[in-house]
Image (tube, rainbow, N blue to C red):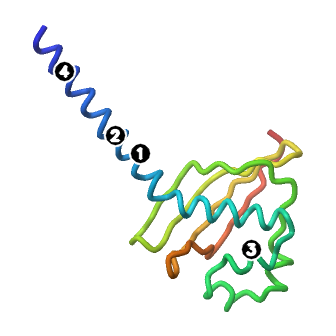
């Protein structure tokens, strides 16, 4: 009976450590996830200038506003869910998620961000429509 008690304590302790790791990842990636979600909402609402300002200076140097307006199209965004979040070197983040659109379709999205002067800025966005769900 004592051995079973120690196994239970060990399993419980392991579960607590795993839970703490997942909680830490969510806390550390809350900033990038919020910035990426807000960026996608701005694009969906045709707030291209605001969305453009939410990108990195390097992105704006490489892509003029007019080209950005033509390339970035998103209509009917209902929700965003991030299923993969990662931070590298404390200043870069990559998020992978799914966009749910009002017409019932979904789109896979990958957003890369950089932390510049304390704010998360979008460096690249790749979207692929998946069709009706």
**Disc 4, SS:** helix
Residue farthest top in this picture: 1
Percent x, y of residue 42:
78, 66
The residue under the point 39% across, 72% down is 89
Marks 3 and 4 sit apart, C-alpha to C-alpha, by 52 Å
Q: Residues within 10 Å of mark 2 (few under 14, many from 20)?
A: few
Q: Which residue is mark 2?
A: 18
**Disc 3, SS:** helix
Q: Earlier in the sequence, mark 4 or mark 1?
A: 4
Left or right, 87 with respect to 97, comes to left
Above or below residue 48? Residue 87 is above
Q: Pointers 1 and 2 in contact (CB under 8 A)? A: yes
Marks 4 and 1 sit apart, C-alpha to C-alpha, by 23 Å
Q: Which residue is mark 3?
A: 51
The residue under the point 50% across, 76% down is 118
Percent x, y of residue 59:
65, 84
Q: Earlier in the sequence, mark 1 or mark 3?
A: 1
- Closest to the camera, between mark 3 and mark 2, is 3
Q: Which residue is mark 1?
A: 22
Percent x, y of residue 48:
81, 75
Marks 2 and 4 sit apart, C-alpha to C-alpha, by 17 Å
């Amino acid at each position: 009976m004592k051995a079973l008690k120690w196994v239970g304590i060990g399993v419980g302790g392991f579960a607590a450590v795993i839970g703490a790791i997942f909680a830490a990842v969510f806390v550390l990636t809350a900033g990038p996830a919020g910035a990426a979600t807000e960026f996608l909402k701005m694009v969906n609402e045709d707030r291209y200038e605001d969305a453009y300002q939410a990108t990195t200076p390097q992105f704006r140097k490489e892509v003029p506003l007019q080209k950005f307006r033509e390339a970035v199209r998103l209509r009917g965004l209902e929700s965003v869910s991030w299923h993969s979040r990662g931070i590298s070197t404390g200043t870069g983040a990559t998020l992978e998620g799914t966009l749910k659109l009002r017409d019932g379709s979904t789109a896979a999205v990958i957003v890369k961000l950089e932390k510049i002067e304390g704010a998360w800025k979008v460096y690249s966005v790749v979207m692929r429509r998946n069709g009706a769900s």
